[in-house]
Amino acid sequence: MSDWYRVAGDGRITLTLHIQPGAKKTEFAGLHGDALKIRLAAPPVDGKANDALVKFMAETLGLTRSAVVLKSGQASRRKVLEVVGAAPTVIAALAATNV
């Protein structure tokens, strides 16, 4: 198991992320300490980066946007997301990120 994600007994997955907003494109960028680094093309203003992050993770994991919840870090580069439902599918999708 990786340090940047944890699976709870009820199937919820907690992701610890380090976000780089204002990048040229949205992509995974490897590990940053105990967090998965994600570059976001969205600027860090008016919640645009947070919205882009939730959308990117939902699309990457094959889930609806409502299944991905920003739990903490609304105004920080370090964010914690909670993913609800389909734990085996989510874990397979996370493993496919090659980090």
Image (cartoon, rainbow, N blue to C red):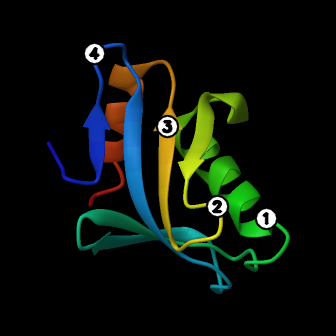
The mark that comes first in sequence, 2 or 3, is 2
The mark that comes first in sequence, 4 or 3, is 4
The quarter of the picture where the N terminus appears is top left
Determine which of the numbered discs, if any, sits on residue 74 in the image: 2
Residue type pointed to by label 1 = Gly
The relative height of residue 70 versus residue 73 in the rendered view (above or below) is above
- Secondary element under disc 3, as helix, strand or loop, is strand
The Cα–Cα distance between marks 4 and 3, rounded to whole angstroms, is 13 Å
The relative height of residue 11 versus residue 38 in the rendered view (above or below) is above
Q: Nearer the viewer, mark 2 or mark 3?
A: 2
The mark that comes first in sequence, 2 or 1, is 1
- As rendered, which of 83 and 55 lies closer to the eye? 83
The relative height of residue 12 versus residue 80 in the rendered view (above or below) is above
- Secondary element under disc 2, as helix, strand or loop, is loop
The Cα–Cα distance between marks 4 and 1, rounded to whole angstroms, is 31 Å
Q: Nearer the viewer, mark 4 or mark 2?
A: 2
| Left or right of 31, for residue 2 | left
The Cα–Cα distance between marks 1 and 3, rounded to whole angstroms, is 18 Å
Circle 1 residue? 47
Please tell me in which quadrant of the rendered image residue 47 appears: bottom right
The mark that comes first in sequence, 4 or 1, is 4
Q: Residues within 10 Å of mark 4 (few under 14, many from 20)?
A: few
- Residue at the spot 36% in from the left edge and 13% down from the top edge: 10
- Residue at the spot 26% in from the left edge and 61% down from the top edge: 99
Q: CB atoms at circles 2 and 1 under 8 Å apart? A: yes
- Residue at the spot 28% in from the left edge and 54% down from the top edge: 4
Residue type pointed to by label 3 = Glu
